Amino acid sequence: MQALYSPLSLSSKPTGAFLCFSSSAASLSSTAHISTNPILFHYLIETFSFPQPKALRISNCFSRIKTLQKPHSVVQFLKQLGFSETHIQSSVKVSPQILFSDIDRTLKPKLQFFQDLGLTGPDLGKFISKHSVVLSHSLEKRLIPCVNVMKKVIVNDKNNRDLIRVLQRGYWVFATPESRLLCNIALLENCGVVGSQLSMLLMRAISPLNISRIHA
């Protein structure tokens, strides 16, 4: 059987923000024991309970941030959407760059997209707290196309209930570009996994890649 594309095989150039939080960047930063941004360093520790090494690494990556105005604004914005303190803390620990995102240009459009799907209030907070990395993806190039693929696959889905269930159970929906997701699904359909059968497997949080292994 033709091999499916694996999310783990993707190769892309990492962004500067990603490098700041990677293990390689950690080793490069480990020699610096003094934060170039003490205000942010202490904020991360006291507000989000970051370990000192990670707080040091992040504060040095964002040395240009001289005040806490943006992080405070982001936290307040998330609270207004119904995020709990726990949701915010979990989201920031996985994706610290959220604190420095532009609310109007980056966070608001992406979160509105998920709200329009039916994830609102605490449900939205719970989803983002587990999958905050989705906020680092492009809305137009990744989030919308991948969700549209799922909408075409999941049949008889009233009010996006099944779609939301799939999104809540796994990040894999956004782990690969739309083209590769379509390719994987097409190969499964060629193997006879179609219609309600494919929908049911997806709702059980089984990615197309794992389904292919079952039918290989």
Image (cartoon, rainbow, N blue to C red):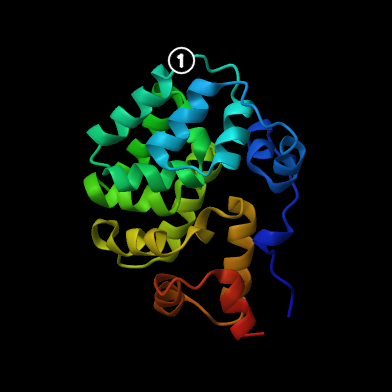
Q: Residues within 10 Å of mark 1 (few under 14, many from 20)?
A: few
Position of the N terminus by quadrant: bottom right
Mark 1 lies on a secondary structure that is: loop
Left or right of residue 25: residue 177 = left
Q: Outermost residue, bottom direction?
A: 215
Left or right of residue 116: residue 97 = right
Place of residue 199 in the rendered image (x, y in percent of width and height, measured from the top left): 41, 72
Q: Outermost residue, front direction?
A: 33
Place of residue 20 in the rendered image (x, y in percent of width and height, measured from the top left): 66, 36
- 205 and 61: which one is in front? 61
* Residue 134 in view of the camera: yes
Residue at 34 percent across and 64 percent down: it is: 165
Count up the numbered dots.
Answer: 1
Question: Which image quadrant is residue 46 in?
Answer: top left
Q: Is residue 31 above or below residue 8?
A: above
Position of the C terminus by quadrant: bottom right
- 70 and 175: which one is in front? 70
Place of residue 113 in the rendered image (x, y in percent of width and height, measured from the top left): 36, 40
Residue at 44 percent across and 29 percent down: it is: 43
Place of residue 15 in the rendered image (x, y in percent of width and height, measured from the top left): 68, 34
Q: Which amino acid type corresponds to the residue marked 1 in the rendered image?
A: Thr
Left or right of residue 156: residue 141 = right
* Residue 144 in view of the camera: no
What residue did someone put label 1 on? 67
Residue at 34 percent across and 31 percent down: it is: 75
- 62 and 190: which one is in front? 62
Residue at 57 percent across and 28 percent down: it is: 59
Left or right of residue 84: residue 11 = right
